[in-house]
Amino acid sequence: MTTGKDMQHQETGDVVIRRAVQDDIPALDAFARGMGQAHEAGYFARCLEEQAAARRQIFLAIDAASGVLAGYVQLNDYPLYAAFRRFGLPEVQDLNVLPDFRGRGIGARLVAYCEDVARAAGKTEMGISVGLYASFGAAQRLYVRAGYMPDGAGIAYDDIPVRAGEMRAIDDNLTLKMTKSLVP
């Protein structure tokens, strides 16, 4: 189980990475609206309830100069994807960086931070998912550069593997699941 107790706060040059708290919900809601995300009402409050129950963690990247929320990521210790769950792999989810802050390595630092938290909790492997259409191109490249490889099960829709001949919409729910060893 990742607790993040040793990883509560990290300064990495131009950003500070820290765990989200209840007071961050308005900023997270505004961030999501600004990114055009369609989260259901109370989404981040529920995520923080899961964080309090040690099921997931939300990490924020705060721009050190302005104090603005530049990005966030979630580390889910109980992902819905059956293969990750079966093997006890935590999953990096919902990585987002505001357009004005992209190209500064913030996404890569958030992913690396999640890896450090998982490694500190004794995890030896990590999971991640990425969408398949062009809007996810930067994330696809980021994950490959970070050492993630497809898990070999093909694509999934809404965390359920897609079988040959099945038709699925090409939307945010169609993903490629990837893994990375956390052992040096």
Image (cartoon, rainbow, N blue to C red):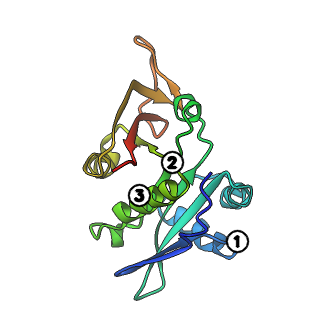
Residue under circle 3? 111
**Depth check, front residue: 73 or 171:** 73
Q: What residue type is labelled 3?
A: Val
Q: In this view, does 112 lie above or below 128?
A: below
Q: Which of marks 3 and 1 is nearer the N terminus?
A: 1
- x then y, percent, for residue 167: 44, 18
**Depth check, front residue: 163 or 91:** 91
Label drawn at residue 94:
none
Q: Is mark 3 on a helix, strand or loop?
A: helix
- x then y, percent, for residue 11: 43, 79
Instruction: Mark 1: give few (<14), some (14-19) or many (20+) Cα within 10 Å.
Output: few
Q: What residue type is labelled 2?
A: Lys
C-beta proximity under 8 Å, tags 3 and 1: no
Q: In this view, does 168 lie above or below 36?
A: above
Q: In which quarter of the image is residue 46?
A: bottom right
Residue under circle 2? 123
- x then y, percent, for residue 54: 69, 55
- Find the distance from the CA under tag 3 to the CA under tag 1: 22 Å
Label drawn at residue 22:
1
- x then y, percent, for residue 129: 43, 41
- Find the distance from the CA under tag 2 to the CA under tag 1: 27 Å
Q: What residue appears at the point 46 percent right and 40 percent down from the top-left corner?
A: 172
C-beta proximity under 8 Å, tags 3 and 2: no
Identify the residue at the far bottom of this view. Answer: 65
- Tell me: 60 left or right of 101: right
Q: What residue appears at the point 46 percent right and 45 percent down from the top-left corner?
A: 124
Q: Which amino acid does label 1 sit on?
A: Gln
Closer mark to the observer between disc 3 and disc 1: 3
Q: In which quarter of the image is residue 175?
A: top left
Q: What residue appears at the point 59 percent right and 40 percent down from the top-left corner?
A: 79
Q: Earlier in the sequence, mark 2 or mark 1?
A: 1
